[in-house]
Amino acid sequence: MIEISVSGIKKSFEIGNNILDGITFQVETGERVGLLGRNGAGKSTLFKILTGELEADEGSAVIAKNSRIGLISQIPVYPEGYTVDDVLQTAFSRHQKLAEEMERLTAAMAAGDAGEQTLRRYGELSAKFEGIGGYDTGTAVSKVANGLSISLEMRAQLFASLSGGEKTRVNLGRLILEDTDILLLDEPTNHLDLHAVEWLEDYVRHFKGTVVAISHDRYFLDRTITRVIEILDGKAEFYPGNYTFYAIEKERRYQEKLKQYEKEQAKIKQLQEAADKLHLWAFMGNDKLHKRAFSMERRIERIRQTEKPTKAKAMTQRFGEKEFSGDEVLHIKDLEKSFESRRLFRDINLLVEGGERIALIGDNGTGKSTLLKILMGEEQPDSGRIRFGPAVRTAYLPQIIRFDNPNRSLVDTMLYAKHGMTTQTARDRLGAFNFRGEDVFKTVSVLSGGEQSRLRLCMLMDEEINLLILDEPTNHLDIASREWIEEAVEAYEGALLFVSHDRYFINRFATRVWELENGAITDYPVPFVRYREIKEREKSFTQAQVKYEKKEDKPKPPPKGGRAQQNARKQLTICEREMEKLEDEIKAAEAEMEANACDYEKYSAAYARKESLDEKLLALMDRWEKLAGEAEV
């Protein structure tokens, strides 16, 4: 069944410039579609046309009859005084209408109305109310809120007091709770932490309806979509697969089209050269050759010429680097920070050495950006100290970009920031960052979030640095811009510290992971893939430990049974002693890690020992569970 049908839609905001130019496609029920295209290609405009927020200039967009459609693109206005919980509860408007009618019928029946029509209507409403989960909305809200990291404390806050990112997260939760037939997701992962992104991925994979997602998160696309529609020059290109398939197939199509174009151009050149020679010979006295030359030229005109394929011009600028002397880049000692009664972190002791690439990860609100601001001197710690190594020069890209005077043009912003720079040099540098032509005279205030990030990077890359600090560097950037930043970071050889929830970016660059959780930073001196493996093993270890402790709580039955059971009980006792011994060794290794938090080599050795002991303990727990079963047979 066709769920969404788009036919010949055209839309322009400037005369003669169609952002959508006759786009046509269909989406079947249950499909997971990724809607891709560069920033400004018209993806969000198309979503607004689908929901009726905008009207198309030409063409039509048809949604299947009785299908409920939900879109997160802008934050709705809610009544004054609405809490986060009130906003989430607005998802149950259908439930509330049914409940109100059921209450009226209940009151009527209590007053003596026992008519067949009243009883039948109440039965129908009751069945429908139960069918849509009307008696269990509290569980649904808690499940979605937990998945999207919306805490009980946050649910009690006024919605108006939240940040833009938090509001977007709450509205995503409301959309999910509405249980629509069609989900339109516009950059759903931009304001989610890793935990929430993974929860959303799982939700989308198991969602029974249709999903169309605009996203620049390549991991998210790979794990959720099965088809790509790319908006290119106002029209639709189709790719039957996830993002990885799309990227490979797009390059294959480009190369194929380029090969066809070059083949046609070679043939045209060959025929044209032959025709030119015939014309020349004809002028030299053989007029009949003109006829043959004209025939060749008509043949050239009949050749179906393939339009020359193009690629977006790559940005080639790279970070300037300053020579670094010494091993110590950054030393954090006993750092602590609180806001009012809420402690973000304490007793942070960390050492960064030259060339390290560190990902600082953790749930939203744990204090990651605050820590970066402390490092840059924008915030002051409550206690502790920070020491940078000799000759360390930093560059910092904050999550929220601000400019001294947003009413200046791009070129003037460059000139004011870089004394001695000429106008032509400023334009050349802006051009290298894909700000070309009249774009350089736009005011900074009209730029999108992604364009502002690009402008700030344009200014940063002129500086010679050896410590680069990035806070969500890929947020609001399209895939092409993300790939360019990744290439720039790849070429940069200095120390790197970054906060990101873009798993592709983290996986590509992190050689060390700092996890900020419960007011402390756990240092994992391993790449991101290895960190994920460790976390999975720790999760399995915790689950096994819970099983072990539950078994321990049960009263032990008196010994009985045959020789096999008696032997199992003996082995069980030996296993428990070994487990106790390993637990003591793990505690000792953890104490050694804490004592050597600022000595990278000793910390790494203690960490490796603890990891090995954890594996042994997990294996013993599995053996203990098997022996416990044999002993109780």
Image (cartoon, grey):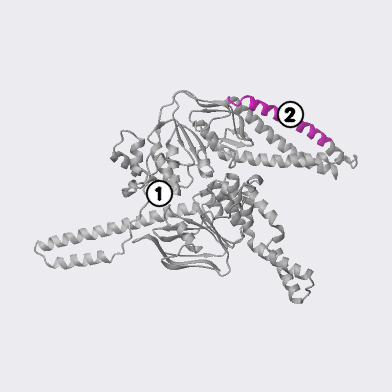
223 is higher (above) or lower (below) than 619: below
Q: In which quarter of the image is the N terminus?
A: bottom right
Asked if one can make out residue 11 in the rendered structure from this viewpoint, the answer is yes
Report the residue marked by disc 2. Answer: 584
Label 2 – label 1 distance at C-alpha: 61 Å
Report the residue marked by disc 1. Answer: 446
For discs 2 and 1, the disc positioned in front in the rendered view: 1
- In the rendered image, residue 459, in percent from the top left (x then y), is placed at 39, 38
Q: Which residue is drawn at 51% across and 37% down?
A: 498
Residue extending farthest bottom = 116
Assign a secondary structure to mark 1: helix
Type of amino acid under label 1? Val
493 displayed left or right of 610 = left
User: Residue 595: within the magenta?
Assistant: yes
Q: Residue at x 27, y 66 (%)?
A: 302
Query: Neighbour class for label 1 at 10 Å: few (<14), some, many (≥20)?
Result: few
Q: Look at the magenta stretch and give its main secondary structure.
A: helix
- In the rendered image, residue 388, in percent from the top left (x then y), is placed at 49, 26
Asked if one can make out residue 21 in the rendered structure from this viewpoint, the answer is no
Q: Which residue is drawn at 69% across and 57% down?
A: 137
Q: Name the residue nearer the viewer: 590 or 446.
A: 446
- In the rendered image, residue 129, in percent from the top left (x then y), is placed at 70, 64
User: Residue 597: within the magenta?
Assistant: yes
- In the rendered image, residue 212, in percent from the top left (x then y), is placed at 53, 58
- Magenta range is 570-598
